[in-house]
Image (cartoon, rainbow, N blue to C red):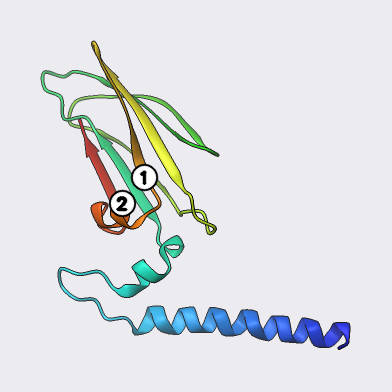
Amino acid sequence: MSYFCKNVIFFILVQAIAITLLIHSSSCEFNKGHHDDINKLSPWLITRHLHVVNGLSNGRILLVHCKSKDDDLGIHNVTADTEFTWKFKPNFFGGTLFWCYMAHSNFHAAFDAFRENDDFFQECNYGDCIWTC
């Protein structure tokens, strides 16, 4: 098979995949109280939103430091009743993980803010993870 034919076949294959995804996503109907199947079938297409909320009282400041393997989001001093938030799309090949460290007075905690698996997708309402301290 010639080089030209291989390129044409590859181009047609890529177009067919893109069109299939577009048709599927546009034909899904939203059900009240449920999420459409495209979120479960192709989770890397969905933009995720993470929120770390300071629910402490008396104006206490919460120190928050979140990062992933590739991104360090920096250290943030989150005032009472406010939040630190960011958005991202999971890695196409899987394995996306964000973890956070929080501190206030003598209290210190670390946790996974987002882990790419079905339990987290359900817990995070298939798009938004909200963590409150």
Q: Crowding at label 2, few (<14), some or many (≥20) Cα neighbours within 10 Å? A: some
Q: Which residue is mark 1?
A: 114
Q: Residue at x 17, y 31 (%)?
A: 81
User: Taking 17 as reference, is 21 left or right?
Assistant: left
Q: Position of residue 33 (x, y in %)?
A: 15, 68
Q: Is residue 64 above or below residue 83?
A: above
Q: Which residue is mark 2?
A: 120
Q: Residue at x 25, y 69 (%)?
A: 35
Q: Which mark is residue 75?
A: none
Q: Are marks 1 and 2 in contact (CB under 8 Å)?
A: yes
Mark positioned earlier in the residue sequence (1 or 2):
1
Q: CA distance from mark 1 to mark 2?
A: 7 Å
Q: Nearer the viewer, residue 52 or 111?
A: 111
Q: Quadrant of residue 1?
A: bottom right
Q: Residue at x 37, y 31 (%)?
A: 100
Q: Is residue 75 above or below residue 69?
A: above
Quadrant of the frame with the C terminus: top left
Q: Position of residue 86 (x, y in %)?
A: 38, 43
- SS category of the residue bearing label 1: strand
Q: Position of residue 97 (x, y in %)?
A: 44, 43
- Residue at the extreme top of the image, as rendered: 106
In the image, what residue type sits under mark 2?
Answer: Phe
